[in-house]
């Protein structure tokens, strides 16, 4: 698993407000984004997102994981 790509997918989901929007921004399928986030959750052994059939609820933006990822996120290249 590419942990950086998984973290990128997680941050995109939080920033975009859902898997479909994140997938569009990343240029991949919704299921690929979901798989990346699920792999990250499995590696960390924690559920990072609350999922229902209608919405995805991200963690608090000031939570410890988002704070840690947020420090590195600006350095990651963004798609043009």
Image (cartoon, grey):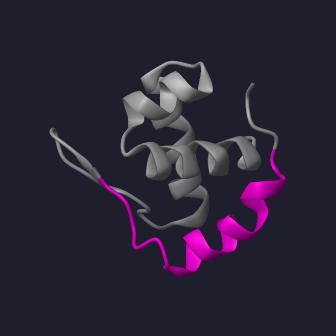
- In-image side of 2 versus 49 (left or right): right
Q: Is residue 57 left or right of residue 11?
A: left
Determine the residue located farthest toward the front in the rendered image: 80
Q: Quadrant of residue 74?
A: bottom right
Do we see residue 12 in this rendering? yes
Say how many tags the image has.
0
At x 45% / y 52%, what residue is drawn?
A: 14
Image x and y of residue 45, in percent:
52, 66
State the image coordinates of residue 11 (x, y, percent, origin top left). 56, 52
Point out the image quarter for the C terminus.
top right
Q: Quadrant of residue 70?
A: bottom right
Q: Is residue 38 visible?
A: no
**Is 9 covered by the magenta stretch?**
no
Report x, y in % for residue 10: 54, 49
- Residue at 16%, 39% in the rendered image: 53
Report the predominant secondary structure element of the magenta stretch.
helix
x 67%, y 65%: residue: 69
Question: Viewer-proximal residue, 55 or 25?
Answer: 25
**Residue in view at x 48 percent, y 50 percent:** 15
Q: Which residues are magenta?
A: 57-76
| Residue 16 percent across, percent down from the top left | 44, 42
Picture quarter containing residue 54?
top left
Quadrant into which the N terminus falls: top right
- For residue 59, above or below residue 51: below
Q: Is residue 8 left or right of residue 41?
A: right
Q: Is residue 58 magenta?
A: yes
């Amino acid at each position: 698993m590419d942990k950086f790509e998984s973290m990128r997918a997680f941050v995109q989901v939080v920033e975009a407000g859902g898997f479909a929007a994140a997938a569009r921004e990343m240029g991949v399928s919704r299921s690929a984004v979901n798989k990346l986030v699920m792999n990250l959750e499995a590696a960390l052994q924690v559920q990072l997102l609350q999922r229902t059939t209608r919405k995805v609820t991200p963690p608090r933006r000031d939570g410890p994981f988002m704070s840690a990822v947020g420090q590195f996120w600006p350095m990651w290249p963004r798609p043009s």
